Image (cartoon, rainbow, N blue to C red):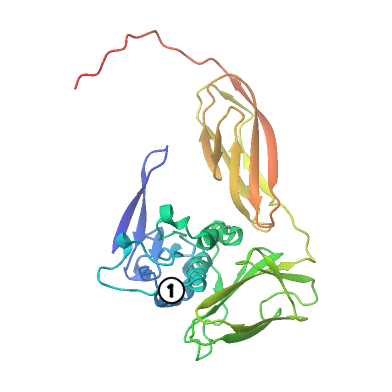
């Protein structure tokens, strides 16, 4: 099945083609997005089942299409309009809600919420998951995490449960799921995580306000992780200083009034990744994105400011001037005529 999704922007409307249930590789090259998991059903069993498809398709992301898992759920229970008629479900525990949203962030693709936003505010711990800085950064970065135990998971786990995302040379995210009904323990060496030995690493619990975690020499240990849960560990290599993205931009030096001007920017592929770009055109108009069209309506010299958010939390900033020449043409006055019904 293929879905055509219209995207409404100030520019002319265009269409994104999404594969949903189609033969996967028959759709390669034809679609922008491909659905890689079953539909959300607001249960931990559904999250566990979705993880299999997300792990199996990590390598297809931005190779054949953008991976599209279904929406995550963090509310304890679905609102009545979203509940399946006649089906009673146990409330989603906070640990199970964390597993749902972390799994979506690991996909690197679509990051959609499947909850009722007007009522989510009554559950502050769950709302905090939606605004979690580390999860949002993973979603903005848009890179798929690699399942480390894709072919080597333990029989008791039944499926891959360990995912790693190298956000840049300094920062990595390690997600460890417990899909089972019993507590589980794990130990990871830095070598097994493809991280250099002998560096000064600091660990943080990304789901608990970046609380520091103890490090046992060159080994990360998780003891008795509870059932139906996930641990998301931020690993910072303090041997490497934080840095801003290295960016280059294209913009004209001078333009005419009412001229459609294109501003574009990109970050160096071998540097710190940029998460988002923010433009201030100096005439009261701001915009976000790597490419923007803008029109100046009055002559003058404007200072354009560009800010690029970086993975290391250090932004790159550029300020430059653009000269706008010419006059705004004003047509002759016209009498207002009330439109006829």
Tell me: 94 left or right of 49.
Answer: right
Residue 237 drawn at (x, y percent): 75, 67
The residue that disc 1 covers is 47
Residue 8 lies left or right of residue 198; in this view the side is left
Name the spot of residue 231 as percent of width and height, x first.
Answer: 59, 74
| 335 versus 9 height, above or below | above
Residue lying at 20% horizontally and 19% vertically, measured from the top left: 340
The x and y percentages for residue 341 are 19, 22
Q: Nearer the viewer, residue 180 or 29?
A: 180
| Mark 1 surroundings within 10 Å by alpha-carbon count, few (fewer than 14), some (14 through 19), many (20 or more) | many
Q: 229 and 61: which one is in front?
A: 229
Under circle 1, the secondary element is helix
Residue 247 vertical position relative to residue 175 in the rendered view, above or below:
above
Question: Residue 43's spot in the image, x, y percent?
Answer: 40, 73
Residue 119 appears in which quarter of the rendering? bottom left
Q: In which quadrant of the rendered image does the N terminus lie?
A: bottom left
Q: Residue at x 42, y 37 (%)?
A: 10
Residue 92 location, quadrant: bottom left
Question: Hey, which residue is sitting farthest left in the picture?
Answer: 341
Where 24 falls versus 241 (above or below)? below
Q: Residue at x 27, y 13 (%)?
A: 337
Image-based side of 168 in relation to 85, left or right: right
> From this viewpoint, which residue is outermost toward the bottom?
155
């Amino acid at each position: 099945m293929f879905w055509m999704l219209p995207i409404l922007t100030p520019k002319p409307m265009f269409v994104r083609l999404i594969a949903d249930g189609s033969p996967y590789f028959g759709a390669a090259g034809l679609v922008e997005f491909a659905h890689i998991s079953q539909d959300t059903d607001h249960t931990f069993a559904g999250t566990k089942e979705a993880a299999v498809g997300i792990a199996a398709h990590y390598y297809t992301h931005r190779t054949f299409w953008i991976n599209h898992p279904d929406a995550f759920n963090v509310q304890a229970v679905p609102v009545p309009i979203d509940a399946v008629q006649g089906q009673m479900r146990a409330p989603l525990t906070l640990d199970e809600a964390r597993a749902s949203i972390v799994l979506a962030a690991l996909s690197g693709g679509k990051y959609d919420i499947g909850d009722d936003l007007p009522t989510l505010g009554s559950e502050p711990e769950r709302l905090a998951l939606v605004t979690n800085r580390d999860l949002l950064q993973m979603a903005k970065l848009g890179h798929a995490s690699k399942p480390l135990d894709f072919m080597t998971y333990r029989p008791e786990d039944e499926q891959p449960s360990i995912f790693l995302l190298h956000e840049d040379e300094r920062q990595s995210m390690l997600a460890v799921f417990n899909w089972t009904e019993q507590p589980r323990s794990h130990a990871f060496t830095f070598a097994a995580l493809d991280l250099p030995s002998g560096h000064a690493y600091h660990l943080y619990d990304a789901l608990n306000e970046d609380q520091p975690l103890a490090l046992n020499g060159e080994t990360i240990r998780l003891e008795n992780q509870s059932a139906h849960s996930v641990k998301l560990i931020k690993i910072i290599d303090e041997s490497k200083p934080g840095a801003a993205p290295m960016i280059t931009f294209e913009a004209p030096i001078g333009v005419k009034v009412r001229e459609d001007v294109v501003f574009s920017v990109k970050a160096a592929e071998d540097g710190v990744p940029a998460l988002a770009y923010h433009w201030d055109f100096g005439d009261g108009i701001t915009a976000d994105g790597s490419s923007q069209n803008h029109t100046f309506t009055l002559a003058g010299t404007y200072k354009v400011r560009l800010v690029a958010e970086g993975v290391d939390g250090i932004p790159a900033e550029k300020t430059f001037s653009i000269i706008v020449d010419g006059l705004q043409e004003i047509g002759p006055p016209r009498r207002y005529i009330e439109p006829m019904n």
